[in-house]
Amino acid sequence: MTLVSGATTISVLDTSDRVVSVVMEIRPLNRSDVEAWIDMRLRLWPDHARHELVGETVDWAHGKLGVFVAEVEDGLTGFAEVTMRDRAPGCTTSPVGYLEGWWVESGHRRRGIGTALLKASEQWSRVRGATGFASDAHADNEASRAAHGALGFAEKSAVLRFHKRIADSADIPAGIGSEASVTLREIDADNVRAITRLAVAPHQRAFVAPNAISLAQYAFATNAWTRAIYADDTPVGYVLLADEEGEEYRYFLWRFMIDRRYQGMGFGNAAMELIIEHVRSQSGAVGLATSYVPLAGGPGEFYHRLGFVDTGQEDDGELETVLTF
């Protein structure tokens, strides 16, 4: 079977459960496919609002996300998404190709489409220097675990997540764009409620505590510094630093978050530049340390792009990473 830009004939069931032959092609996503791709993403991740699943189109457009689709005579029937990561749990090589999403319409499964999408993703990763390939699945998703095993994956850990919806996702506010000026402002009685209402996406909640918890911890700390992150006059994020006098790097990024509605707009990078500038100006500062949970969707790659380097130290499941001055 040709992996990309080639066609093959497969057998599927029609609406009357009869076996029929159709032509199928595995190829890279193009701009005319984007709406259909987002529709399929909603079927794979039904707990997400549509606007939450549109953000990755930016990564695809900039070449950071590889997307392959399976096309049959009546439209798209599956997709695979792949990125490059510096590392992945269970992998000893770097960089690593990572299967971020993988889905085939139920009526077209068990016909080799998923396998062909996976092989196209592996090929994309090999061209970019990867010798390892990783993925993940919920521990109770027996079908996904079996599919991974059949295609040569070895299980390294079980991923368990708990989630409940207590409110509908807020719409992206109008009137704020990526050109907005980013500043760090003190938190007071006038803006504290707005800061506590900021939140990351549901799948990111395992990586950072709610801002209300962080503000409560700050209230009882004697060596901390906190600020709200603003884009123009709109609060978009939160930062909490600890001054750990006597520690090797002294300054520790305790909490950092950008609200889910404002991610992918450059505000995180701009805020980190201001934070780093602040730490550099402090007496005795030789670096800025932080830690992150090394799971899919975590902030590790964000820190690495800023120049942070992992130290190899691990504490309570989090990896330490440091930017030295």
Image (tube, rainbow, N blue to C red):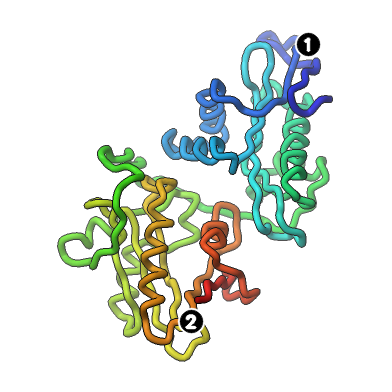
| Residue drawn at x 64%, y 38% as measured from the top left | 66
Secondary structure under tag 1 reads: strand
Q: CA distance from mark 1 to mark 2?
A: 65 Å
Instruction: Give the image location of residue 201, x and y in percent.
Output: 43, 49
Question: Outermost residue toward the bottom?
Answer: 246
Q: Is residue 113 left or right of residue 258?
A: right
Instruction: Give the image location of residue 8, x and y in percent.
Output: 80, 18
Precedes in sequence: disc 1 or disc 2: 1
| Residue drawn at x 30%, y 48% as measured from the top left | 180
Q: 10 Å neighbourhood of mark 1: few (<14), some, or many (≥20)? A: few
| Residue drawn at x 34%, y 57% as measured from the top left | 237
Q: Examine the image and state in which quarter residue 15 appears.
A: top right
Pointer 2 residue: 286
Pointer 1 residue: 21
Instruction: Give the image location of residue 92, x and y in percent.
Output: 76, 62
| Residue drawn at x 46%, y 83% as measured from the top left | 250
